[in-house]
Amino acid sequence: MPEGVASGLEKGAPVRLDKVSFSYGSHGSYGEAPLVFDVDFATAKINAIMGPSGSGKSTLLNLVAGFETPQSGRVLIGGADVSAEPPSARPVSMVFQENNLFAHLSVEQNVGLGRSPSLRLTEADRAAIAGALARTGLAGKERRLPRELSGGERQRVALARVLVRDRPVLLLDEPFASLGPALRDDMLELVAAVHAERGMTILFVTHQPEDARRIGEHMVFLDNGLVAATGKADDFFAGAGPEAFRRYIGAGAGGAVSRDVARKRT
Ligand SMILES: Nc1ncnc2c1ncn2[C@@H]1O[C@H](COP(=O)(O)OP(=O)(O)OP(=O)(O)O)[C@@H](O)[C@H]1O
C-alpha cells in the first residue's frame, strides 16, 4: 500500500465530509434525491453511526473508504483532501459484516496482508502478526483456513489485521451483526480495548442501540440520506436525541433507552 497519505498522521486522524453529495446510478437523473453528508466525526473517539435501513450508513463509510466517489464536496482525513485517492491510498482500515478474509489463505496470511499485500514479510512483520494474533485470542490457530474458524473467530482475524495495519481511522460496518449476543459482547470489549490502546478514530455503523450505547462516545444519526443529528452518545440515550432517533430505537429495540440495556463501559 502506498504510504504517502498515511505517513505523518497521528493516531486518531480527524475525518470530515465537507458538503459531500452522492447518488447511485445515473447521477440522480432518474429522480433519486442525492445523499448529502456534511459532518465532522469526533477525532480519536468511537463514533456510532445509526439510522433506519436505507438512510445511507454504508454509503457514508464507503465514501470515507474510497469505494464510492462524491459527485461534489470533499472527503478530508487528517486535514488532507483524499476525495480522489483510491481506497488503497487512504489511511483507513475497514471491517465488514462478513467476507473480510481470503478463503484460500491461512489465518496468519490473512493477517499478514495488513502488513504487505505481497506477503513478503520481515521479521518485524512476523512479530507484529504474532502479537496481533495473541491479542485477539487466536494464538495456535495461525495455520487454519477461514472455513475452519467460527464466525466470531473470523471477525477476530479481521481485527488482528486492523492491528497490524495500524491506520489512524477504522471503519466498522456492522461487523458483529451476525454473531450471537455473548460473542458480540466479547467483540465489543475487544474493539473498546484496542481503541483504548491505539486511539484511532472509529466510525462504527450499527443497528444495535445497546452496542452503540456500550462503546459509542459520539453519535451520528442519519435519516433519509442526510445527517439528521450529531452529539454525545450518552445524551442521545438519555433521551436528548431528536424525535426521529427516539422513534428509531423505540421501534427497533423495544425501548432501548431504558436503563436495563447493556451498561456503558467507563
Ligand atoms: N449499489 C447501489 N445501487 C443503487 N442504490 C443503492 C446501492 N447501494 C445502496 N443504494 C441505495 O442507497 C440508499 C442508502 O443505502 P445504504 O446501503 O447506504 O443504507 P444503510 O443505511 O447502510 O442501510 P442498511 O441499514 O439497510 O444497511 C438506499 O436507498 C439504497 O437503496
Image (cartoon, grey):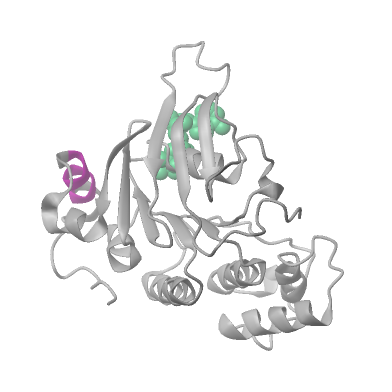
Residue 248 is inside the magenta segment: yes
Camera sees residue 143: no
Q: Quadrant of the N terminus?
A: bottom right
Q: Locate residue 217, reporting x and y percent.
A: 31, 62
Q: Locate residue 99, reporting x and y percent.
A: 63, 56
Camera sees residue 15: yes
Q: Quadrant of the C terminus?
A: bottom left
Left or right of 248 in this view: 23: right
Image-quadrant location for residue 127: bottom right
Q: Which residues fall within the magenta stretch?
A: 244-250
Question: Does 253 appear above or below 264?
Answer: above
Secondary structure of the magenta portion, mostly? helix
Question: Does 128 appear above or below 174?
Answer: below
Q: Locate residue 145, reporting x and y percent.
A: 74, 72
Left or right of 61 in this view: 122: right
Residue drawn where x is 64% and y is 49% of the image: 90
Image-quadrant location for residue 218: bottom left
Residue drawn where x is 15% and y is 55% of the image: 255
Residue drawn where x is 16% and y is 70% of the image: 260
Give the residue furthest to the bottom.
140
Left or right of 29 in this view: 128: right
